Amino acid sequence: MNAFKRTAIALGVATALSLGTAHAQVSDNLIKIGVLTDMSSLYTDLAGAGSVVAAKLAVEDSGIEKRGYKVEVISADHQNKADVGSSVARQWYDVDKVDVIVDTPNSGVALAVSQITRDKGKAFLASGPGSSDLTGAKCSPNTVHWAYDTWMLANGTGTAITKGGGDSWFFISADYAFGAALERDTAAAVIKNGGKVIGGVKAPLNTQDFSSFLLQAQASKAKIIGLANAGGDTTNSIKQAAEFGIVKGGQKLAGLLVFLTDIHALGLQTAQGLTFTETFYWDQNDASRAFAKRFSALDKGIYPTMVHAGVYASVLHYLKAVEALKSDDGTKVVAKMKEMSTDDPLFGKGTIRVDGRKIHPAYLVQVKTPAESKAPWDYYKIVATIPADQAFRPLADGGCSLVK
């Protein structure tokens, strides 16, 4: 055997050994990502199939498969039911060997999945749910909460509207964990800024007829009707409020959680002038525009919401942590994610706090008029930027047991 062949064989053996060592702690030699989302109901456009697309784009852009790792993305519909979501999570962790669950719009489902994830020692990357309890009283060392939360929404939108003269509020809230948290956090922001809460009513999830709730809000004479709901519930309540002539009668609507897909469903003629808080907009810069173009081609022409952006960015950072650790042990990977600074094309540079809260700027946006919009999905103008260190609840105020 000549020297060249001996050298080539030695290099091949060394490469194989290094790859074997690198992946030795990756279970089943496979990183398995489960996208748990709403595929069939009121959150399907803002998350749904788009969240699967976002996860797959993150895997592709990470380049991890080119370096010898195997990654698989699977998905399931939680049907907005905590028992269904819990059953899927257990099946995935115990039988299907899923390493990380991502997305999960619906805070009730997410809080259940967060606890199961902790019990199983896996990882949960939540970008769909809103409840700030995920990094507060119900925080977990195995959960990262990425895109937004109810405290951020409340203090962005609630504070701005109250300071602008909207100092009396009536809430129409989704009757589950998310709606309760959003109403609670917004009411606190309103009172802190000198406003008052006159009353409120709970509406069942996926309500089709908001007439009785809107009549109560109208009768309250509150200046602001706070909509502590999301997705189809938000668009239905805004459309029906227009039919009742509520805004023409002098009251204003505050959409406390509004997504790009909601504005698309409402149309600019109905949605124009709405002010709310976001953490991502596709038309912010060249990187976000390039992502939106790729994403929309794969998701029925839909442009990405902040949930989709959160899925993409969180999976990208998760895979970086897996590679750095050479392990997919969920508890260790989440700890590594917190240790490493975040940096991605959609949210830029950031950090993940000990309570699991991902920190980045938020934006107060206003919906354009039909005349101001120059292209499809050109819906927002950014009114103000809320710096990262002010956008989310102070670490000491959340009641998270991980905070020493």
Image (spheres, rainbow, N blue to C red):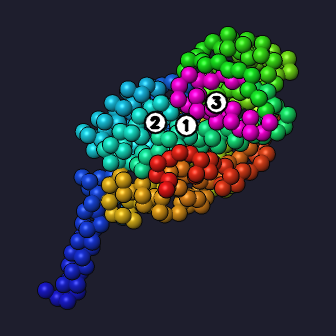
Q: How far apart are marks 3 and 1 (CA)?
A: 10 Å
The amino acid pointed to by label 2 is Ala
Q: Which mark is residue 110?
A: 2
Quadrant position of residue 189: top right
Q: Specify whether residue 187 is painted magenta.
A: yes
Among numbered discs 3 and 1, the one appearing first in the sequence: 1
For mark 1, does the 10 Å Cα neighbourhood hold few (<14), some (14 to 19), or many (20 or more) residues? many
Give the percent coordinates (x, y) of residue 304: 59, 42
- The residue drawn where x is 49% and y is 56% is 404
The amino acid pointed to by label 1 is Ser
Q: The magenta stretch spans which residues?
A: 170-194
Q: Mark 3 points at which residue?
A: 183
For mark 2, does the 10 Å Cα neighbourhood hold few (<14), some (14 to 19), or many (20 or more) residues? many
Q: Are marks 2 and 1 in contact (CB under 8 Å)?
A: yes
Q: Mark 1 points at which residue?
A: 131
Q: Do the residues labelled 2 and 3 touch (CB within 8 Å)?
A: no
- Is label 2 or label 3 in front? 3
Q: In this rendering, would 211 be left or right of 321?
A: right
Name, please, the residue furthest toward the bottom.
3
Residue toward you, 333 or 288: 333
